């Protein structure tokens, strides 16, 4: 159709509809003509934290692909794989509203048509500490599914939240070591007004636990403020934070202050020189295990 000035315009509204695909084959067809793809992997049950990643993905200027897949490989036998909330329609609505171009929501059979026997095994020094120590095999499952998603989507960029700090670092190293042509972008932790980091697992909390949960962040913040004020006795600060949490009824797995780069303990020299640090925590309230961290 011609406008008055003779320029052409379409009688159809612009293509804004999000494509939803389930198989890797459908995915390949959906991304074939997309340019500058940013991938945001998730396990669904999307909250504002996830949506902040979608916004960051949109800011990259190209197409956005979001995956929603609860990955059995990264769950331990006694973890919440079966009960992990699956909210497909609500997730699809949120992703579409956020302007995502393609939602990849494979079933287990779509993702693992035969048992996934080839695995990506990150080194013990990164993967068997902290989360990996308390959740054996977790990062093997994460690295394997992320590698598979990277191969299936072939994105230019991929976004991971700092909420899962060790995961972000392990994926960064994986990309470096395999020379994958993908830029990894870190998203800041999205918190509620009370400081509680948004998490799908917050939905498991009772009213009382939800009221207590922000103290996880507050306890970290107390330690962070002390480090920033010049306190270098990180062992004592970790213990103090563990004791605070225990006294409040938490079962902490760890509180650790370590180097951002490789999550190892800083030397006294590095501490003196102002090495970038991060404090990380994992603790259970009731029967829900939460993680959080703050960069220092
Ligand atoms: P998940 O669905 O828990 O696997 O999370 C998918 C992605 O969203 C991961 O990269 C997480 O680190 C990120 N994410 C989850 N919660 C938050 C949050 N509160 N702030 C920022 N990123 C988050």
Image (cartoon, grey):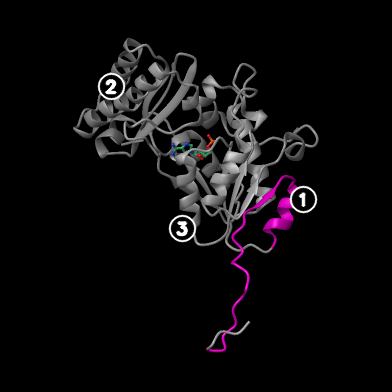
| Residue under the image location 61 percent in, 16 percent down | 78
Q: Earlier in the sequence, mark 3 or mark 2?
A: 3
**Image vertical order of residue 227 relative to residue 90, above or below:** above
Task: Calculate the distance from the C-alpha at mark 1 to the C-alpha at mark 2.
Answer: 51 Å
Q: Earlier in the sequence, mark 1 or mark 2?
A: 1
| The C terminus lies in quadrant | top left
Q: Nearer the viewer, residue 262 or 22?
A: 22
Q: Residues within 10 Å of mark 3 (few under 14, many from 20)?
A: few
Indicate yes or no whether the magenta region holds residue 30: yes
Q: Is residue 132 left or right of residue 110?
A: left
Badge 1 crowding class, 10 Å Cα cut-off, few under 14, some 14 to 19, many 20 or more, is few
Residue 187 belongs to the span the image colors magenta: no
Where is residue 243? Give x, y as percent.
31, 13
Q: CA separation, marks 3 and 2?
A: 38 Å
Report the residue marked by disc 2: 237
Disc 1 element: helix
Mark 1 vs mark 3, CA separation in Å? 27 Å
**In this figure, which residue is indicated by the disc labeled 1?**
25
Which mark, residue 135? none
Placement of the N terminus among the 4 image quadrants: bottom right
Residue 169 visible to an observer of this rendering: no
Residue beneath disc 3: 59
Residue under the point 79% across and 37% down = 113
Residues in magenta, as a range: 5-32
Please state the horizontal and vertical placement of residue 172, each as a whole percent of the image: 52, 44
Is label 3 in a helix, a strand or a loop? helix
The foreground one among 30 and 17 is 17
Which image quarter: residue 171?
A: top right
Q: Closer to us: mark 3 or mark 2?
A: 3
Where on the picture, by quarter, is residue 136? Answer: top right
Query: Residue at the location (48% across, 34% down)?
Result: 166
| Closer to the camera in the image, 77 or 207 | 207
């Amino acid at each position: 159709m011609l406008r008055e000035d003779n320029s052409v315009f379409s009688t159809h509204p612009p293509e804004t509809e999000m494509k939803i695909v389930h198989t890797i084959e459908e995915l390949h067809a959906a991304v074939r003509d997309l340019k500058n793809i940013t991938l945001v992997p998730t396990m669904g049950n999307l909250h504002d934290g996830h949506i902040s990643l979608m916004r960051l993905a949109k800011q990259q200027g190209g197409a956005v692909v979001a995956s929603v897949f609860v990955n059995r490989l990264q769950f331990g036998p006694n973890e919440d794989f079966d009960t992990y909330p699956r909210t497909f329609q609500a997730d699809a609505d949120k992703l579409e509203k956020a302007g995502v171009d393609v939602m990849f929501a494979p079933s287990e059979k779509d993702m693992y048509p035969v048992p996934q026997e080839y695995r990506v095994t990150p080194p013990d020094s990164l993967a068997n500490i902290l989360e990996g120590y308390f959740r054996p095999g977790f990062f093997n499952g994460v690295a394997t599914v992320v590698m598979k998603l990277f191969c299936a989507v072939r994105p230019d960029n991929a976004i991971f939240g700092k909420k899962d700090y060790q995961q972000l670092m392990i994926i960064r190293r994986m990309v470096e070591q395999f020379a994958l042509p993908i830029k990894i972008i870190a998203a800041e932790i999205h918190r509620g007004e009370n400081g509680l980091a948004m998490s799908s697992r917050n939905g498991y909390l009772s009213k009382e636990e939800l009221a207590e949960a922000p103290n996880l962040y507050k306890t970290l913040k107390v330690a962070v403020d002390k480090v920033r004020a010049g306190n270098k006795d990180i062992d004592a600060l970790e213990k103090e934070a563990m004791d605070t949490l225990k006294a409040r009824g938490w079962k902490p797995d760890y509180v650790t202050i370590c180097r951002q780069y490789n999550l190892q303990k800083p030397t006294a020299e590095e501490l003196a020189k102002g090495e970038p640090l991060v404090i990380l925590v994992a603790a259970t309230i009731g029967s829900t295990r939460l993680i959080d961290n703050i960069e220092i």
